[in-house]
């Protein structure tokens, strides 16, 4: 079985990840993993941190001479910002360490600060936000790049694009070729395939900048070249649609997942929603009238592109802070502000393909590998 874990804090020494179960002989390129990490850091609306970090992966186990060797793969990504935090977050306490901490006592509504502080009985949310931070997804993206390498060996490709920022929506379907072309760009604005829509999206981000606010959005992940038969209807946890939803919603700030055209389908009649079935005798394969199901029926891939969308809320660190309460005094206070992003949807799309690759298609590939 393929399994991965990550560890690491936002301002700690590094992020680490292990991936167990990759078969031997899969070609691995450091440049390809680093490209995915670069992609995760791009996009209009990202905060100052992206200027400090240029993520580079170090593979410290499981890959030799550019191929997996069947043993666990271990990855490390150093946090360049750690040099500014050695005094505030030392591993071992030192005399006078108390004064060097950077406490967060005014929890941000929407962040993990308050819920985490209550759960772990901390009077300062620092340790909570250090791990709740989406910095963690850098490790998942790196693991996702390995998953994509495995899927690539079967001709499966996974890419993503942005379909909404706030109220600015892409109002047409994106062709697969457009999504691939987007991925090859060396400059990323908001990750939308349509330049006119992207300009409207940018206006929304600019408005959020101007008003000290933040804005959410929607991204779409597509897997192409997926064979029919991955996932299963037989148990709740072998349904691939459920696995994909977990992969998407486990991403920080993602509050909803959609498989295919779920929202539109819920508001339509069945005759307009289901994808009619046809047979191509020459090609000796079933074909479908459309792909509104997003390539999944009964939790099983049907051979069409797998299409999953993630809905991101606006992030919770606002330059114009919301009402909160100080954890130590219990007095009303404005929520804490720490250098932050304004719109993370283009970044989320960078990691979403990786996450889907890592958490869900990894599972699919696993079953595929096992012939299940
Ligand atoms: C790519 C990405 C970057 C993020 N950057 C920030 C940020 O700069 N500031 C912030 O408050 N939240 C940010 N978030 C969201 C928080 O990590 C998230 O809201 C928090 O961990 C609470 O989890 P929840 O929103 O899933 O409930 C980011 C999320 C993603 C996906």
Image: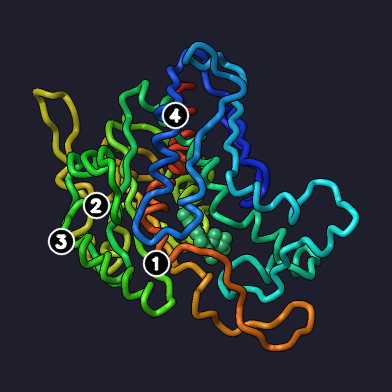
Point 61% across, 21% down: residue: 61
Is residue 88 rendered to the left or right of residue 73? right
Discs 2, 4 touching: Cβ within 8 Å? no
Measure the C-alpha gap from mark 3 to mark 2.
Answer: 25 Å
- Which one is closest to the eye, mark 3 or mark 2? 3
Q: Residue 164, relative to residue 2: is it above or below?
A: below
User: Which residue is disc 2 drawn over?
Assistant: 292
The residue under the point 55% across, 40% down is 139
Gap between marks 2 and 1 measured at Cα: 24 Å
N-terminal-most mark, 1 or 3:
3
* Residue 125 image offset from top left, x and y in percent: 71, 66
Binning the other alpha carbons within 10 Å of mark 1 as few (below 14), some (14 to 19) or many (20 upward) gives: many
Q: Earlier in the sequence, mark 1 or mark 4?
A: 1
Disc number placed over residue 64 in the picture, else none:
none
Q: For residue 310, what is the image quadrant? A: bottom left
Query: Which residue position is annotated with label 4?
Result: 365
Does label 2 or label 4 sit earlier along the sequence? 2
Q: Earlier in the sequence, mark 3 or mark 2?
A: 3
Which numbered circle lies on residue 216? 1
Q: Of discs 2 and 4, which sits in the foreground? A: 4
Is the C-beta of the residue carrying label 3 under 8 Å from the nearest atom of ligand 1?
A: no
User: Could you tell me if the residues under marks 1 and 4 are in contact, i.e. CB atoms within 8 Å?
Assistant: no
Q: Position of residue 156 (x, y in %)?
A: 32, 29
User: Residue 219, relative to residue 229: is it above or below?
Assistant: below
Density class for disc 4 (Cα within 10 Å; few <14, some 14-19, many ≥20) is many
Res. 225 visible in picture = yes
Which tag is nearer the camera, tag 1 or tag 3? 3
Q: CA distance from mark 1 to mark 4?
A: 31 Å
Question: Looking at the image, which residue sits at the far bottom?
Answer: 332
Q: Secondary structure at mark 4?
A: helix
């Amino acid at each position: 079985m393929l399994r991965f874990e990550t560890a690491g804090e936002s301002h700690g020494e590094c992020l680490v990840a292990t991936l167990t179960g990759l078969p031997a002989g899969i070609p691995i390129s450091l440049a390809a993993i680093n490209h995915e990490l670069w992609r995760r850091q791009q996009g209009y609306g990202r905060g100052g941190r992206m200027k400090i970090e240029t993520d580079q992966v170090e593979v410290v186990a499981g890959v030799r001479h550019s191929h997996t060797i069947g043993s666990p793969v271990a990855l490390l990504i150093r946090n360049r910002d750690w040099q500014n935090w050695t005094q505030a977050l030392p591993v071992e306490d030192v005399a006078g360490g108390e004064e060097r901490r950077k406490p967060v006592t005014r929890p941000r509504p929407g962040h993990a600060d308050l819920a985490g502080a209550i759960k772990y009985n901390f009077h300062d949310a620092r340790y909570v936000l250090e791990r709740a931070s989406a910095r963690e997804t850098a490790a998942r993206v790196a693991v996702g790049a390995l998953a994509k390498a495995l899927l690539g060996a079967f001709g499966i490709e996974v890419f993503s694009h942005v379909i909404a920022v706030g109220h600015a929506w892409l109002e047409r379907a994106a062709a697969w070729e457009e999504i691939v072309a987007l991925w090859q760009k060396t400059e990323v604005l908001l990750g939308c395939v349509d330049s006119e829509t992207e300009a409207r999206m940018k206006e929304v981000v600019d408005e959020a900048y101007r008003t000290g606010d933040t804005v959410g959005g929607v991204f779409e992940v597509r897997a192409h070249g997926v064979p029919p038969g991955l996932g299963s209807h037989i148990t709740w946890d072998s349904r691939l649609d459920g696995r994909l939803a977990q992969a998407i919603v486990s991403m920080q700030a993602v509050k909803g997942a959609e498989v295919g055209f779920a929202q539109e389908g819920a508001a339509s009649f069945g005759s307009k929603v289901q994808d009619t079935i046809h047979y191509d005798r020459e090609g000796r394969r079933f074909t479908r009238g459309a792909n509104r199901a997003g390539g999944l029926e009964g939790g099983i891939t049907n051979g069409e592109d797998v299409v999953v969308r993630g809905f991101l809320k606006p992030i919770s660190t606002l330059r114009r802070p919301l009402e909160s309460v100080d954890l130590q005094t219990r007095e009303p206070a404005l929520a804490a502000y720490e250098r932050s992003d304004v719109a993370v949807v283009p970044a989320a799309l960078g990691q979403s393909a990786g996450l889907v690759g890592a958490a869900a298609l990894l599972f699919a590939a696993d079953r595929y590998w096992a012939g299940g």
